Amino acid sequence: MKKLILTSLFVLSMAEPVKMNKNLSVRVIDADGVTHNLRGISCNGRNYLRVREGSVEYAISFENIRHIKVISQKEDAIDVKVQLVNGIEKHINISTNTYCTSQSELGKASFYIKDVKDIFIERGEQR
């Protein structure tokens, strides 16, 4: 039992802390049409978005994303259109369980991407 507890503590201590770039201004428009002005973003504890195109999985840094638009939702995936800062646009899939956190004037903000319409990401100070 002692060994199990020590092993668990060791594994948990190896977990990377959530990295969030606070220089990113994030505007989230939720499913109800309410706009939320946030600072920084992390999804599933990562500073990048895990996506799937066909049978290949990608990790796209939030630094490289300009806009995420939710198109539709299936049972196991969300169809989104992602616009990158270099102008490339892709229709890709993300997990329905993609859970994001951010900061606001009120405190920590959290949401599932399946519950939003749009996410706009800008560099620099929030307007």
Image: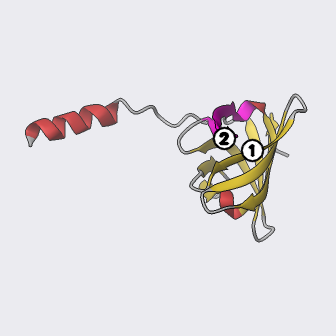
Residue 46 belongs to the span the image colors magenta:
no
**Residue 125 appears in the picture as rendered:** no
In which image quadrant can residue 4 be found?
top left
Residue in front for this viewpoint, 37 or 13: 13
Q: Is residue 88 left or right of residue 56?
A: right
Q: Which mark is residue 92?
A: 1
Residue tagged by mark 2? 51
Q: Residue at x 75, y 67 (%)?
A: 31
Q: Position of residue 15 (x, y in %)?
A: 40, 33
Along the line of sight, the residue nearer the viewer: 85 or 125: 85
What's the residue type where badge 1 is placed?
Ile
Q: Is residue 30 above or below residue 11?
A: below
**Percent x, y of residue 6:** 17, 35
Q: Report the front residue among 84 and 89.
A: 89
Residue at 56% in and 37% down: 46
Kindly indicate whether the residue at mark 1 contacts the one at mark 2 (C-beta within 8 angstroms).
yes
